[in-house]
Amino acid sequence: MSTAPDQTRPATSGLPAAQSFDRRAALLFALVALLFIGTGFMQSWNTTLTILNMGLVSAIMALGVNMQWGYAGLFNVGIMGFVALGGLAAVLVSMPPVGEAWAAGGLRVLLGLVLGAATIVAAILAYMRLPVGRMRTLAMLVILVGGFILYRRVFDAGVAAVEAIDPATTGYLGGLGLPIILAWPVGGLLAAGAAWIIGKTALGLRSDYLAIATLGISEIIIAVLKNEDWLARGVKNVTGLPRPVPYEIDLQANERFLAFADRIGADPVTFSSITVKLSYAALFVVVLLTLIWLSEKAWNSPWGRMMRAIRDNEVSASAMGKDVKARHLQVFILGSAIVGMAGAMMTTLDSQLVPGTYQPLRFTFLVWVMVIVGGSGNNWGAVLGGFLIWWLWIQVEPLGTLLMQGITAGMSEDAWLRNHLLDSAAYMRLFTMGVILLLVLRFSPRGLIPER
């Protein structure tokens, strides 16, 4: 009796599956590298390095989401909130403290936060220890209402005093004044803490409810960043964050740097910008490679096999004694920590925190496209998707404008079709992302580099 060929595996031409996979991955990464190199020759190397650095950060975000979705099948649509927490960490760690603000109301703000946390803890303890009945309900109401009133009286007075201190330039407490590179792991810790809170309340729900919960909490985080000026200046933004690499103006004032630029025949201004971007790229590559190495070790370990078993059949895994909810919480925290770290790295690269720029289109939808196109369940596929999709996101709009200009070159300037096509070039990004996603789902539903 003849058997049908396995339609889920690519043709291997007699090679083992692993060798075929490695060759395919190497070819795809080489093609993406050619896109970046071509950008350098056709436009500028400054542009290429700018796209590359954000591509590295996007690849790390995709790696964290792939850990949640590819490892455990957790549908997290609150990526934006975890990225924002990483950005907040960059401010809290690296910016110098504002002494006048601390003297005016810093301690009252901290005391108010402590009172708020103590109120929640006291209400939880009352609920757990008091017997069911009217007494427990009354005790919880007294604790919550009284604690809330006390919290607001202390906290609001402190916030008003802090935000009144030179609001045009500060109006917030500042940070710890530490090296900004320390904000990267701190960003991961903040995101992990938020993920623990979300996971303890929502991971027992169905996947669609988890998606709603993560989206809602993400919006809450952004709302807090926009409205609590004492924390990170709100919509007034925090600019001038310290750098882990030299400033361009400092390099241009360095005699040895100028001598080296003259020796290779480079313009000092352009060469200083390229040097700074290369320095960022080197730091980001170290982080990305470290995370890939750790992810691959975890994926190929007994823990990784257990996570795949839970993902594929939760009922069977639970019947074999695996604590499904605990493992889901574990991987949800790990993936969120990686996303938070990437958020801190992105804010470091931008040297500013702008809460208004955290939009679901950029920090949720686009990252999901990276994971799906690259190949969910495959760490290298997620990284490939991060580079490829970010390059397309940046380059498609100018390329689309050139295309529309070429198509309408023979039309009169007042032709309605010409104006319509030129106006449509602004939507080429969204159109291209949709087309790519549809093509990949149709012809390679497991992604460009599918799970082995």
Image (spheres, grey):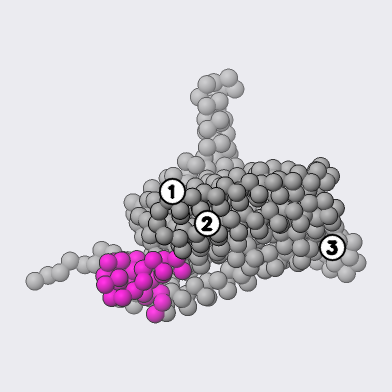
Q: Nearer the viewer, residue 142 or 187?
A: 142
Which label is found at residue 403? Answer: none
Q: Quadrant of the C terminus?
A: bottom left
Q: Which residue is mark 3?
A: 251
For badge 1, the amino acid type reads Ile
Q: Residue at x 43, y 56 (%)?
A: 202
Determine the residue located farthest toward the left in the rendered image.
1
Q: Residue at x 37, y 56 (%)?
A: 205
Q: Nearer the viewer, residue 20 or 193?
A: 193
Q: Quadrant of the N terminus?
A: bottom left
Q: Residue at x 54, y 21 (%)?
A: 415
Q: Nearer the viewer, residue 370 or 11?
A: 370
Q: Quadrant of residue 73?
A: bottom left
Determine the residue located farthest toward the bottom in the rendered image.
302
Q: Is residue 240 left or right of residue 418?
A: right
Q: Residue 329: within the magenta?
A: yes
Which secondary structure lies at badge 1? Answer: helix
For badge 2, the amino acid type reads Ala
Above or below, comparing residue 405 to residue 338 in the picture: above
Q: Residue 142: within the magenta?
A: no
Q: Nearer the viewer, residue 78 or 296?
A: 78
Q: What range is drawn magenta here?
A: 302-330
Q: Residue at x 42, y 79 (%)?
A: 301
Question: Counting residues from the N terminus, which is met first, the one under dot 2 or under dot 1?
Answer: 2
For badge 3, the amino acid type reads Leu
Q: Which residue is mark 1?
A: 212
Which label is found at residue 123? Answer: 2
